[in-house]
Image: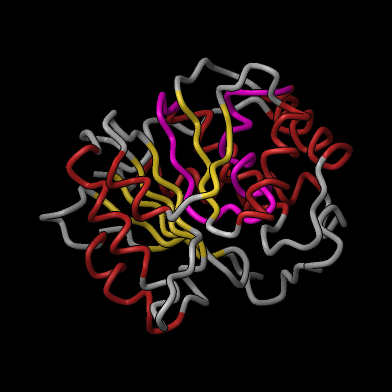
Amino acid sequence: MIREYRSDDWDRYVMDFRHPHRVLEPVEQEIAVVDAALRTLHQAGVMPHVNYDHAKMLAHREAVRDLFDIPWTAITPRMQRLLYAINVIKQPRNMIAAGVFCGNTFISNAGAAVGPGACYTARKLIGVEIVAAEAERAERNVRKIDSTGTAYVLAADALDMVAQFKDPIDLLYLDANGGRGRGKGIYLEILEAAYDRMPAGSLTLAHNSVNGGEHIQQYLEFVRNPAKMSASVNVVFDKEGLEVSAK
């Protein structure tokens, strides 16, 4: 059973958090690493195929670079490309991203359906950020790219928002931090709140699968349990990592 994709240079591929658009490697190398990760996800049964439009991905990247206010980010160029590609391939009608800060991670997902990188039509793409000032910044950023209103950011507790959401959740992105010492342990609570409304084949993406620490262990045990999820793969091509799980 495939449980991991790990690039040879994952621990040497270092992000400059304060310079989110800095080029870290030739784009051909970036594409090769992400394509290898996508092939692993496909082989594991997480993704139906590996095809996405590279030109539209770059159009999305350029729009984010030119229009977004990003004070800092841990989302590497590789991760940005992978998130975009997964959403292009999966084409979720309803997507919820929990813990979106300034909106960069959110639009890495939502940009597959809105803005210059759009490849399909979605219904609801919702980013949730508990810090009101950052939610407002994220919403301002998203409005610069999406004129349709399909993608939007709410100032709310992601756990409450997911629990109250009535429609099917086709893709759930997790990057939130829980209070009272829970940290990334909030991932499992959010997934459990969403689980009954996630149809077969829906995806959960958990950032910080490598550096999330002990708080993420119960979450990883849950998504790697075949009684709960059909497949789960840890993508490790930077120091943060992304666990990609299919129901």
Q: How many marks?
A: 0
User: In the rendered structure, does residue 100 fall within the stretch colored magenta?
Assistant: yes
On screen, 44 above or below 151?
Answer: below
Q: To which quarter of the image does residue 62 belong?
A: top right
Residue 239 in the image, given as x and y percentages of width and height: 61, 72
On screen, 42 above or below 76?
Answer: above
The scheme the figure's colours follow is: secondary structure
Residue 206 in the image, given as x and y percentages of width and height: 44, 58
Q: Nearer the viewer, residue 108 or 3?
A: 108
Residue 168 in the image, given as x and y percentages of width and height: 28, 30
Left or right: residue 242 compared with residue 133: left
Residue shown at 44% from the left, 75% from the top: 179
Left or right: residue 209 compared with residue 187: right
Residue 187 in the image, given as x and y percentages of width and height: 37, 63
On screen, 185 above or below 247?
Answer: below
> The N terminus lies in which quarter of the figure?
bottom left
Q: To which quarter of the image does residue 186 belong?
A: bottom left
> Which stretch did the figure color magenta?
91-115
User: In the rendered structure, does residue 33 fall within the stretch colored magenta?
Assistant: no
